[in-house]
């Protein structure tokens, strides 16, 4: 049985998507925003993240970009506490 999500069932929720600067990560971030989630997009490439957050905002969604290399534990902790 297949069910297609419609509407905004994720309103009031927050999603964190790593690897969001391109490909499946960017597509996932866009879809989560369409479903109502506020999305934190995380990846190394600031310019790609900025473009993605602008796209999400122009479609009526909410997103914030967090440029960080998730393989760098200290950088992740610093970004998380900011």
Image (cartoon, helix red, strand yellow):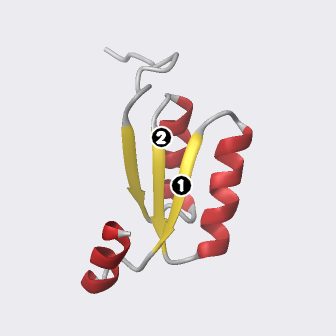
Residue 48 in the image, given as x and y percentages of width and height: 64, 68
Viewer-side residue, 49 vs 3: 49
The residue sitting at 34% across, 82% down in the picture is 75
Residue 17 in the image, given as x and y percentages of width and height: 41, 55
What SS does tag 2 mark? strand
Picture layout, residue 73 above or below residue 60 = below
What SS does tag 1 mark? strand
Q: Earlier in the sequence, mark 2 or mark 1?
A: 2
Tell me, yes or no, whether the two marked residues, 2 and 1, touch with CB atoms within 8 Å: yes
Tell me where residue 18 sits by quadrant: bottom left
Picture layout, residue 82 above or below residue 69 = above
**Residues packed near mark 2 inside 10 Å, few (<14), some (14 to 19) or many (20 plus):** many
Quadrant, the N terminus: top left
Residue 5 in the image, given as x and y percentages of width and height: 45, 20
Q: What numbered label is drawn on residue 64?
A: 1
Count of marks placed on residues: 2
The residue sitting at 47% across, 40% down in the picture is 38
Q: Is residue 66 left or right of residue 15?
A: right
**Residues packed near mark 1 inside 10 Å, few (<14), some (14 to 19) or many (20 plus):** some
Q: Is residue 61 left or right of residue 74?
A: right
The residue sitting at 40% across, 28% down in the picture is 12
Q: CA distance from mark 2 to mark 1?
A: 8 Å
Quadrant, the C terminus: bottom left
Q: Is residue 50 left or right of residue 36?
A: right
Viewer-side residue, 77 vs 24: 77
Picture layout, residue 60 above or below residue 1 = below
Mark 2 — residue? 38
């Amino acid at each position: 049985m297949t069910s297609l999500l419609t509407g905004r069932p994720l309103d009031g929720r927050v999603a964190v998507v790593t690897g969001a600067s391109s490909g499946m990560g960017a597509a996932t971030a866009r879809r989560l925003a369409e479903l109502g989630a506020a999305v934190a997009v995380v990846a190394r490439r600031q310019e790609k993240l900025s473009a993605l957050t602008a796209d999400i905002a122009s479609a009526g969604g909410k997103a914030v970009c967090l440029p960080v290399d998730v393989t760098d534990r200290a950088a992740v902790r610093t970004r998380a506490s900011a």
